[in-house]
Amino acid sequence: MTASGAEAALFWVLAPLMVLAALGLLFARKAVHAAVCVMFVMVGLAILYVAQEAPFLGVVQVVVYTGAVMMLFLFVLMLVGVDAADSLTETIKGQRWVGVLLGLGLVVVLLGVIAQATFPPAVGLAEANAVTNPVALARVLLGDYVLAMEVVGVLLVTAALAGLVLTHRRRLSVRPTQRVLAAARVAALPQGRTLTPLPAPGVYAQNNAMDTPALGPDGEPLPHSVPRVLRIRGQERSATAVLAEEETLVARDDLRLIGVGPTSGEAVPAPVGLVETTSGASPGSTTGGTGTTGEDEDGGVR
Amino acid sequence: MEITNYLGLAAILFAIGATTVLLRRNAIVVFMGVELMLNATNLAFVTFARIHGDVTGQVLAFFVMVVAAAEVVVGLAIIITIFRSRRSASVDDVNLLNS
Amino acid sequence: MTMQTLSLAPWLVATPMVGALVLLVAGRRTDRWGHWLGVLASAATFVVGLVMLLDMLGTPADQRVGTHTVGTWIDSGPLHVDLGFQVDPLSMTFVMLVTFVGTLIHVYSVAYMDHDVDRRRFFGYLNLFVAAMLLLVLADSYLLLFVGWEGVGLASFLLIGFWDGKRENAVAGKKAFVMNRVGDMGLIVAMMLLLATFGAVDFGTVLPAAGEGAAAAGEGTMTAIGLMLLLAACGKSAQLPLQAWLGDAMAGPTPVSALIHAATMVTAGVYLLVRSGPLLEAAPDAQLVVAIVGALTLLFGAIVGCAKDDIKKALAASTMSQIGYMMLAAGLGPVGYAFAIFHLLTHGFFKAGLFLGAGSVMHAMDDDVNMRRFGGLARLLPVTAITMGLGWLAILGVPPFSGFWSKDKIIEAAFVGEGWRPWVFGLTALLGAGITAYYMSRLFFMTFAGRRRWSDGGPGDDGAPERHPHESSRLMTWPMIVLAVGSVALGGILALGDRFVTWLEPVTGHAEHHEPVLPVWLLVTLTLLLVLLGAFLAFRQYAVAAVPVEPPPAPALVRAARVDLHQDDVNESLVMRPGQYLTRALVYSDRTAVDGGWLGLAGGIGRLGARLRRFQNGYVRSYAATMLGGLGVVALVVWVLAS
């Protein structure tokens, strides 16, 4: 039996593309690209299944493979690191030649077998699918293969459990309770720790001011209000520099906005007040919206 | 077009999958190669079901899919566990069977 | 069997065994009283034996043979052996000999071993020996006999090497043990043959069936059995060619030499042959070999005895020679059995007495055994001299002492028969009697007569060792006196009216009286003449003339006799060296051919494995490539086969 013209067209369009995509799996440097190529091949296969009078399998292919399995792959890729490019230099001596040779040889042998074999005249599934394909499948599956199906169900449950067990991390110590944490914090007081949450960094109008220390009630900057990571990296900014910058900006913009040139002899009270208030740690302008940082909540260690 | 062309496609896809297993070192890519091989056999199953006019082939393909799903769960879990302990997803780093 | 006391038989073995176990297991805790426990165990055994003997004497002669079965010992397919005790005149004779002489020697040893720190262990071994010896003679099957046989071998080994601090003693013990093993092989093979031929190894089945067995299995088998039994007897009784260990066995304490290596254990071979009489009668060839071995050993021991200066070794050679007489008698058939046992009995008494006397002399002479340094001891050791003198007269065969009654009968029996045999055996026995007289007289005169060749500490004895001889304590002299009485009277009492022969008849069968080829009166006269001649020669040479303190130059035969007629050289060159070469060759071939082959194979496989190991590189992809290659090959084969 030969396929219809439409099917032939579909095949000849799809098959080369699928082969190309499969080669993409083989040659893509990045695993994500490879995964996308495989997804293409799988969708193509789903289409071919439908074309081959197996619409149920086609749908399952899309749902299970493209929808579930390949998504799982992508998740794992994300977990492992998307941009972990595969080094293409071969480490096993001769493995590349062996692989290429075996791959080609396999193609030759399999195609040779297919060409050599004599197939019976194709029957087609029109008769078998008379009651629609899913029903025909279900009859076989729940009839002849019901035991196998049950076993496969057990297998799936087992696999799910295996996934849980294998990815489970064992906690090596007892989980600390709040009481323990509190006691530890009090015990750490002599080492210069504080009971209260650390002050939030200073947040000013012009800056994402996580790197700028807040000002204490006495107007002095509080260095430990800046996250520890930034301090270690040396990305901390000095509060005075920021304030001086702000002051000049405010002064200029204020003058420009109110239409008074710098030459105006009129005393502008705003800058002076601003300077006064900022140096006096005005809460309205120096504290950010969030009073605490995540780190404080975690354990107060900064 | 002969229906056996599908078999040829399946053979080619299978060989490409096998070659991927042999040549790539990223465990996830290798695993995808395995999946490609399974899919290729599924295509062959479906084609044979059509040739023989019997949906049993499709049922077998169905089983292959289910088993493959289970296999993916376990396999990826293993890959993650190995990655956690060795910070690597290369199959060549897991050569403790050596010597 | 109407004997009331038959069931006492196991106690004969158990009593000394309990003594041995207590002494050996309880260890040093029993050091203070252990020797008396040993004496007590032995004496108690004697009393039990005496009760049984009296009971047996009160039983009609035809009902004196009985077995007491304790239970099944081995039940393994065709081999069924009961744990049974054979009680009959023969075994009772041995029981009395072993327990009576044994008890006397136990008593003697209390004093003799007085200064030995291991006296308790010594008595443990002695009791062990008594138990094993009684088991040997009371066993009702060859297998049980073999247990006792090995037991006495073990006790002998332990006692020869009792002073194993000295290397020679340990070596002597080992030599005796090894040579006895050769004989044991004979007994084991004999038992196998018996089992194959008769399907049993107990006396009750085998012995009555000996005649039929010979008819059924052929005379060759019976000859083999007889020769194997002879081999066993040779090992145990120090007969040619397994005689070499007895001389060295004198390394043990003297009471041991008296009990084990003179009176009892070494005669076990004779017991075995007499007990197996019916088997030997079914194999005339083997019987002849027994007689020949006996005759040869008789001469061998006598010649060696003439040249030995070591008093104990001279006595050992004499023992060998006397046992040769017994073997000769046992080889003569039913006519000789009773006389073999008779001589065994009297010999047990007078030889034990002689050994105890020798021990007493050694005690007096600071454990010196060199007779050339003795002399003139008769006045200083009167009891020892008199008891040894009586023993000397007994072994010489001077009437009416014990030896006369037993040895003359053997000489007489040796002259019975037809053709060449009576002449050869008879003349050998006659000659042996003469030589015996010479060497025993030599021993006696060198020790007790002549001038002293030791120093009493006074002036004028330059170079001679200083000794202070004194008579031994009563614990030592009384056993010697009792044995001397036995040496004097026992033979005559038992010989009157053929009492002993009649007594043994239930076991040995009635032997028709045969006339010797020469008249009896002539034989007796000839024997006495030869004995007198030998004694006279010895008297002239060692009592009248001065005895040189160093062995003088001598003809080749004497020189050879001084080294035991080169028995050790013969053994070494014929057996030991070839054995060593054989084992060395085997070891070499084992190392090179067998080990080399297998090691080579193993090495080859190892190297192959090392090559193959390279394929096992641990890389999963390599393995996958191999699998895929295999798949390709399979597909290719399918393709080719299908097309």
Image (cartoon, coloured by chain):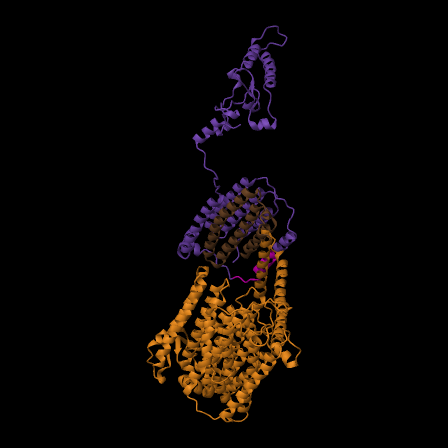
Chain colours: A purple, B brown, C orange
Total numbered labels placed on residues in the image: 0
Residue A154 at what x, y percent from top left?
42, 51
Q: Quadrant of the C terminus of chain C?
A: bottom right
Residue A285 at what x, y percent from top left?
53, 17
Q: Nearer the viewer, residue B12 or A160?
A: A160
Q: Quadrant of the N terminus of chain C?
A: bottom left
Q: Residue furthest front?
A: C459
Q: Is residue C77 left or right of residue C422?
A: left
Q: Quadrant of residue C96?
A: bottom left
Magenta-drawn segment = A105-119
Q: Residue furthest right?
A: C553
Q: Quadrant of residue A130?
A: bottom left
- When the figure is inspected, residue A250 is found, relative to residue A18, above or below; the finding is above
Query: Is residue B62 visible in the rendered structure shown here?
Result: yes
Per the image, is B70 magenta?
no
Query: Is residue C202 visible in the rendered structure shown here?
Result: no
Q: Nearer the viewer, residue C297 or A180?
A: C297
Q: Nearer the viewer, residue C403 or A142?
A: C403
Q: Nearer the viewer, residue C522 or A288?
A: C522
Residue C196 at what x, y percent from top left?
46, 80
Q: Residue furthest top?
A: A265
* Magenta span main SS: helix
Residue C564 at what x, y percent from top left?
60, 77
